[in-house]
Structure formats: structure tokens, C-alpha cells
Image (spheres, rainbow, N blue to C red):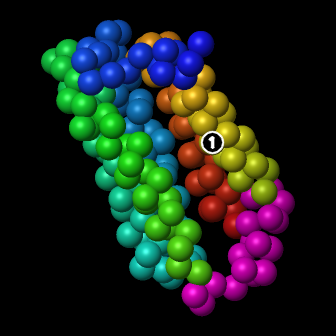
């Protein structure tokens, strides 16, 4: 079965089974990403990193808004859904572009120290799992959505804890 056949979210899809609590739980990874971005931005002192993080953060907030609108009014405002496919990669690429003035060895030492490295590893595994979900699961299914939100929340919390321990 092709990916498109598995992932049935389209412009015409009205998400069924989405709820306001689901939308608010989807805010958790956005909040922890934002907290992590502030902490990392302070470490990196990079305007491009901060700009990319803001793009990613706003994209996540818009996606939460889409989910809340879908839950409350049973409407699919397609640009609010699909924007994440464009803005998230742009934001992440912008975050990794500016490397001037960074001491890679010092950063690696901090980020790979114990126990922070365990949290970064758990966060990275969660993000890999999110990629698997994106390509193989149906995001219009509320059960899949809850699973994605749980994994994403745990991954973002792990990244945040790792940054706090670094």
C-alpha cells in the first residue's frame, strides 16, 4: 500500500474523533520545544538559530490551532495543517546553518556528558519514531494522533532535560 493510501489526511478530510483535550495535549511538545530552543539559543548565541526556532515554534502553534478548530468546529483549514510540512524543515535548516563562533568540541563535551546524553538519545529515538509514524501511519486516525503526541511530547521533554543537564 502506498504512503498516500495509508495517510488519508487530505484537503477534504474532516478529522473525526479529534477533541479539544487532544489539541491541548498537542501543545506539550510545542512548549517543551520552545523551552529547549530558548536554552539552546542561549548556548549558541546565534540569530539564525533563534530565527529558525521561532519559525518551528510558530508552525507548531498553528498546527495546535488547526487541531483545536478541527475538534471544535469539525472544519479542516488545510493551509493550517499543511504549513508544518514546509515551515518545520525550513525552521530546522535555518537552526543548523549558522555555526560561526561555536566551539564544537566544547559543545560536544557538554551534550555527550552523562546523564544528558541518555536524554538526548531518548529524544533522538523519539524523533526517529515520529518519522516512521509520518511515513507509515494515518495521521487522520485519532488513536495514531494520540500515539504521535505522546512520543513527540516525551521526546521534547527528553531534549529539554538533556539541555538542562548539559
In depth, the one of 45 and 88 nearer the eye is 88
The residue that disc 1 covers is 127
- Above or below residue 55? Residue 10 is above
Is residue 9 located in the magenta-colored stretch of the structure?
no
- Above or below residue 56? Residue 66 is above
The quarter in which the N terminus is drawn is top right
Which residue: 60% across, 90% down?
Answer: 101
Which residue: 50% across, 29% down?
Answer: 149
Q: Secondary structure at mark 1?
A: helix
Q: Residue furthest bottom?
A: 101
Question: Residue 111: where, in percent of width, then height?
Answer: 74, 66
Q: Residue furthest top?
A: 17
Taking the image as drawn, is residue 150 in sight?
no
Question: Residue 95: where, in percent of width, then height?
Answer: 50, 67
Is residue 106 located in the magenta-colored stretch of the structure?
yes
The quarter in which the C terminus is drawn is bottom right
- The answer to whether residue 61 is left or right of residue 118 is left
Question: Residue 124: where, in percent of width, then height?
Answer: 69, 47
Res 108 → quadrant: bottom right
In depth, the one of 6 and 74 nearer the eye is 6
- The answer to whether residue 128 is left or right of residue 45 is right
- Above or below residue 39? Residue 26 is above
Q: Residue furthest right?
A: 114
Segment tinted magenta in the rendering: 100-116
Amino acid at each position: 500500500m502506498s504512503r498516500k493510501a495509508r495517510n488519508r489526511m487530505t484537503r477534504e478530510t474532516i478529522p473525526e474523533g479529534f477533541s479539544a483535550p487532544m489539541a491541548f495535549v498537542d501543545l506539550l511538545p510545542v512548549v517543551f520545544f520552545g523551552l529547549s530552543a530558548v536554552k539552546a539559543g542561549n548556548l549558541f548565541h546565534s540569530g539564525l538559530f533563534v530565527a529558525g526556532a521561532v519559525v518551528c515554534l510558530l508552525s507548531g502553534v498553528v498546527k495546535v490551532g488547526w487541531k483545536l478548530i478541527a475538534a471544535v468546529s469539525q472544519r479542516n483549514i488545510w493551509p493550517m495543517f499543511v504549513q508544518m510540512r514546509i515551515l518545520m524543515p525550513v525552521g530546522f535548516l535555518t537552526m543548523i546553518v549558522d555555526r560561526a563562533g561555536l566551539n564544537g568540541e566544547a559543545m560536544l563535551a557538554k551534550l555527550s556528558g552523562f546523564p544528558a546524553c541518555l536524554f538526548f538519545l531518548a529524544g533522538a529515538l523519539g524523533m526517529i519514531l515520529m518519522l516512521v509514524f509520518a511515513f507509515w501511519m494515518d495521521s487522520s486516525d485519532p488513536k495514531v494522533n494520540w500515539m504521535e503526541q505522546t512520543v513527540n511530547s516525551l521526546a521534547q521533554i527528553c531534549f529539554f532535560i538533556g539541555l538542562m543537564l548539559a
